[in-house]
Amino acid sequence: MEQEQRTQTNSQSATLSPFSLDGKLALITGGGSGIGFDIARCMVQAGGTVVITGRREQPLQEAVATLGDRAHYMVNDVTDRPLLDDLVERIEAIYGPIDTLVNNAGINMKKPALEVTDEDFDRIVHTNLNSVFSLTRACAKRMMARQSGSIIMISSMAAYYGIDRVAAYAASKSGVEGMVKVLASEFSGNGVRVNAIAPGFIETAMSKTAMGGDPDRFARAMRRTPMGKFGQPEDIGWAAVFLASEAAKYITGASLPVDGGNSIGF
Ligand code: NAI
């Protein structure tokens, strides 16, 4: 029996790399630009099929045209929580079962805590945490029924240590980190793995806004990054490919820093 299983596994690995996403479908929120776009690009390159979402159709159309035949889009604002169940149902009806959910869409805001209004705080938490829960629930109930799935949250260094002037953002990403552990303990017995990727400082529109006109903040970020440079969106993309693949089949409840050492730098 054991021998039979081993032979089967060997013959599978002869045809398919454990890192391949061949035959797997991923839903990536906010996939039209920045990190989300590169997650989609890396997943397509690894053999997968992707559905990216975002609020505006034109950037999504352009992204899909660049990504090729195995990329599709749906216009969707993740903060429209009552629509998320329907989104998942439509995607599965058209493209088949979702194997991987990447909760990438997110917003940031840099303001001293005393200037953050309740509306500011709610807006950030609503996008980065509440909507992530609703979409995850919609996908997870279908994944659990199929006994298979991988859910990836995009967290942040703001959930690891104290970065000034991002109180709401840090609260939202810390909530996501907590949720990863709880959901992993609830879902993993049913074949659904839940993990986070915690990007360090990655070159995108969001980090340019956060660092723009703030050379002191930029210098502080680089000083505690042993690799001494910003990461590229594809660095997050390849980590997502790994977590979505069979190569990561025993990894759940983890938060993987992809940060050039920023989280451990002195
Ligand atoms: P970005 O601003 O370049 O891209 C964010 C994407 O999310 C955009 O495509 C945007 O349209 C989409 N989005 C925002 N609100 C949405 C909504 N309500 N519905 C649907 N889509 C929405 O930012 P970036 O840098 O690519 O960030 C991606 C993720 O990575 C975010 O969750 C962010 O918090 C996280 N992150 C980024 C870091 C960086 O250094 N760039 C560092 C740590 C975390």
Image (cartoon, rainbow, N blue to C red):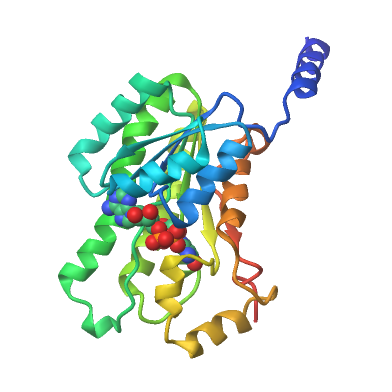
Q: Quadrant of residue 159?
A: bottom left
Q: Is residue 169 above or below residue 162?
A: above
In this picture, residue 217 sits left or right of residue 245: left
Q: Residue at x 37, y 23 (%)?
A: 92
Q: Nearer the viewer, residue 79 or 142?
A: 79
Q: Quadrant location of ligand 1? A: bottom left
Q: Position of residue 173 (x, y in %)?
A: 40, 61
State which quarter of the image contains the N terminus: top right
Residue 86 appears in the rendering = yes
Q: Position of residue 120 (x, y in %)?
A: 21, 70
Q: Nearer the viewer, residue 71 or 3?
A: 71
Q: Is residue 130 above or below residue 118?
A: above
Q: Position of residue 82 (x, y in %)?
A: 18, 39
Q: Is residue 222 above or below residue 29?
A: below
Which residue is outermost to the bottom?
Answer: 216
Q: Quadrant of residue 246?
A: top right
Q: Position of residue 203 (x, y in %)?
A: 53, 67
State which quarter of the image contains the C terminus: bottom right
Q: Nearer the viewer, residue 13 or 29?
A: 29
Residue 244 appears in the rendering = no
Q: Residue at x 50, y 90 (%)?
A: 216
Disc tally is 0
Q: Residue at x 45, y 71 (%)?
A: 207
